[in-house]
Amino acid sequence: MVDHARARKLAKRISQIVAEALEHEVKDPRLSMVTITDARVTGDLREATVFYTVLGSSVDAAPDAAGAAAALASATGVLRSRVGQQTGIRHTPSLAFVADEVPDEARRMEELLARTRESDAEVARLAAGATPAGDADPYRAPREDAADLD
């Protein structure tokens, strides 16, 4: 029997515990710019997937995603024991860390929308001074005089 509400509560608690542990207990400098974004727990509460993002330290510096992934892999045991201590459940779920793709996809979508807005503005600029190629209303039917109908 799967209790989805319990799994959601446990996932939220796991993300809080892992974020606190990364901030205060794990002293790996590669994890200084890692942010925990979400956690999901299976229905049987045996496995937890923790999603994270790596923020760049400045505008020019690219985030070290590979280093952060390696640091999280090496700290998995410590983080799992911390989760077990603070949740108090019988079986501590195994932790799997997955890089969150949502920020990258959101950035890509914003770039596509900006390009679309520029294209729409260009079309509107060109249409503002345009004139029809033929008559203004090519579908207008010719008028018949009332005298011709008699």
Image (cartoon, rainbow, N blue to C red):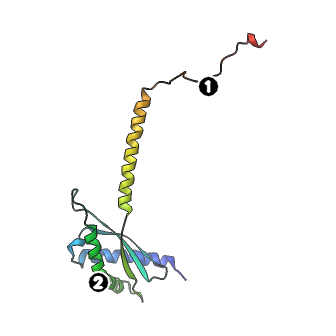
Q: Quadrant of residue 31?
A: bottom left
- Disc tally is 2
Residue nearest the observer in this picture, 11 or 131: 131
- Give the alpha-carbon distance from disc 1 to disc 2, as whole Å: 76 Å
Q: Is the residue 126 above or below the residue 28 in the image?
A: above
Q: Is the residue 142 above or below the residue 125 in the image?
A: above
Label 1 vs label 2, nearer the camera: 1
Q: Residue at x 45, y 26 (%)?
A: 130
Which quadrant of the figure contains the N terminus? Answer: bottom right
**x, y percent for residue 66:** 27, 70
Q: Quadrant of residue 77?
A: bottom left
**x, y percent for residue 93:** 40, 83
Residue nearest the observer in this picture, 134 or 140: 134
Circle 1 is placed at which residue position? 139
Amino acid type assigned to the residue bearing label 1 in the image: Tyr
Q: Residue furthest bottom?
A: 90
Q: Is residue 58 left or right of residue 106?
A: left
Amino acid type assigned to the residue bearing label 2 in the image: Val
**x, y percent for residue 85:** 34, 86
Q: Residue at x 39, y 36 (%)?
A: 122
Picture disc at residue 99 = none
Which quadrant of the figure contains the C terminus? Answer: top right
Circle 2 is placed at which residue position? 78
Q: Secondary structure at mark 1?
A: loop
Q: Residues within 10 Å of mark 1 (few under 14, many from 20)?
A: few
Mark found first going from the N terminus, 1 or 2: 2
